[in-house]
Image (spheres, rainbow, N blue to C red):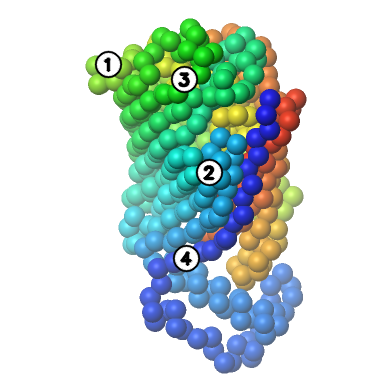
Amino acid sequence: MSKHLIVFTGILLSVSFLSGKAQNTELSDAIHKDTVFVDGQQLNEKQLKRYYRQLRKDSIRAHKKIWWSVLGGPSYTPEASLGVGGAVLASFRMNKNDTLSQRSFLPAGINLSINGTVVVAGAGTFFFNQNKFRIYASYGYRNEPAHYYGKGYETIEHVDRSDSTTRYHRSYFQLYPRFVWEVRPHFYLGGLFDINFTNASDINPVMEKDPYFNQFKRKYLNVGIGGLIQYDTRDDVATPTHGVLLSGNIKAFGKYLGGAYNYEILELEYRHFVNVFRPRSTLAWIAKSQIGMGDVPYSELPSFGSPFDLRGYYWGKYRDKSMAYGIMEYRHMFGSPAKYKSGNFWAKCGFVAWMGTGTIGNTPFDWNKWKLNFGAGLRVQMQPGKNFRLDIGKEPGLDGVQVYMNMTEAF
C-alpha cells in the first residue's frame, strides 16, 4: 500500500463585515484606569487593551449579518498532486431579532490542484423561529481521481491500491437537505430529499471486471425522498459540549422520482456529549449504522473512512450493503471561558484524540470483523463554538496516515 500524506501550509485569518464607524473606534485612553480580573488575576494594561478589543469585536460581530472565517494555503496529495486547499466558514442569524436561535452556519472545504482536481463540499445548519425549525444541508462537488476496491471484505482486502487496480476518475455531485420541526421540546420530525450524480471514467482493468461495479452504468443520477425523527438535547449543533442526539432516517430512491435505480437506505445514529474534568473539555462518542436495501449503486454503498467518521481510512475503501461504526473522542480547549472571552490566543487553541472501530457486511448479521482506528488533531476556535480542525488519522497495519482539514467537528 502506498503512503497517503497531505502537506499543508496555511494562513489563518478571521474576516467580518464591519462598519467603518465600528472599525475606526479607538480604545479609551483611560483603559489603564480600569480594574479587570480574569481567573482571579488582575489584567495589566496590555491585557486590558486585548480584553476590550475582544469585547468590541464580539459586540460588532453579534450584530452583523455574516461572520466569515477563512483558512487557506498550498496542499499536496498523491492523487490530487500539488494544489491549493482551504476552508471557509460563514455564520449568521436568519432573523436578527431571533436571539433564541443558534447562529446558522455554512462551512465549505475547497481543493484545487494542477491535475484538474476540483472539490467543494460542506455541511451546514440553518436555524429558524427560535430553534423550532431547522434545515440541515450537505452538499458536494468532486471532480477527482478516486479509488474503488470492491464490495465486501472478501474483495476489498485482496486488492492492492494502485493505478492499475483501484484508481479511476470520478465526477460526483450531491445535494442533501433535511427539514425538521420541533413538535415537542427536543423532539423533531421532518422530511428530506437526496439528489446525487456519478460519472466514472478512466476505469482500470480490475475495476472493469468487478461484478458489482458492472451492475451499474458509468453515469447515473439518483433521486430520493424520505423522513427522519430526532431527539436532540445538544447545547450547540456545531460544537456540542453536553447533550444527546438520537436520530433515525430512511431514504427511498427510485426510477419513479427520475433516478436510475430503486433502493433504500436506513440510517440510525446516537451521539452523546459530556463535560469532563474542566469547563472546556468534552468527552464525545457516537454510534452509527447504515443499511442498504435494493439495487444500491457502488458509489452509494454504506461506507466509512470519511472526514466525518473513522478518519484514517481511505475514503470509500470499506463499503458494503450495511455498515456500522463507533468512536470515542476527547476534546480539549486550553484556558478558561474567561481567558477565551478576554482574547487570549492560547484559549482559542486545543486538541482532540479519538479511538474508533467499524465494520461492513452484506447484512447486519455479517458484522463479524471490526477494523480499529485512532488519531489526534489540533483545534483553533475561529468563532464562538465554531472550530477549525486539522486531524491526523491512522489505519493500523498500513504505512502512512490520513490528514483532514475542515471547519466544525467531525460529529
At horizontal 68% and vertical 19% (from top left) the residue drawn is 370
Foreground residue among 236 and 396: 396
x and y percentages locating residue 116 in the rendered image = 45, 40
Three-letter residue code for mark 4: Val
Going from the N terminus, do you reach mark 1 or mark 4 first?
Answer: 4
Going from the N terminus, do you reach mark 3 or mark 2 first?
Answer: 3
The answer for how far apart the CA atoms under marks 3 and 2 are is 44 Å
Task: Kindly check if marks 2 and 1 are in contact, taking CB atoms under 8 A apart as contact.
Answer: no
Task: Kindly check if marks 2 and 4 are in contact, taking CB atoms under 8 A apart as contact.
Answer: no
x and y percentages locating residue 106 in the rendered image = 42, 49
Structural crowding at the residue carrying mark 4, measured as other residues with C-alpha within 10 Å and reported as few (<14), some (14–19) or many (≥20): few
Task: Classify mark 1: helix, strand or loop.
Answer: helix
Which residue lies under the disc numbered 4?
Answer: 15
x and y percentages locating residue 247 in the rendered image = 48, 30
Which residue lies under the disc numbered 3?
Answer: 203
Three-letter residue code for mark 3: Ile
Q: Is residue 369 left or right of residue 230?
A: right
Residue 294 occupies which quadrant of the picture? top left
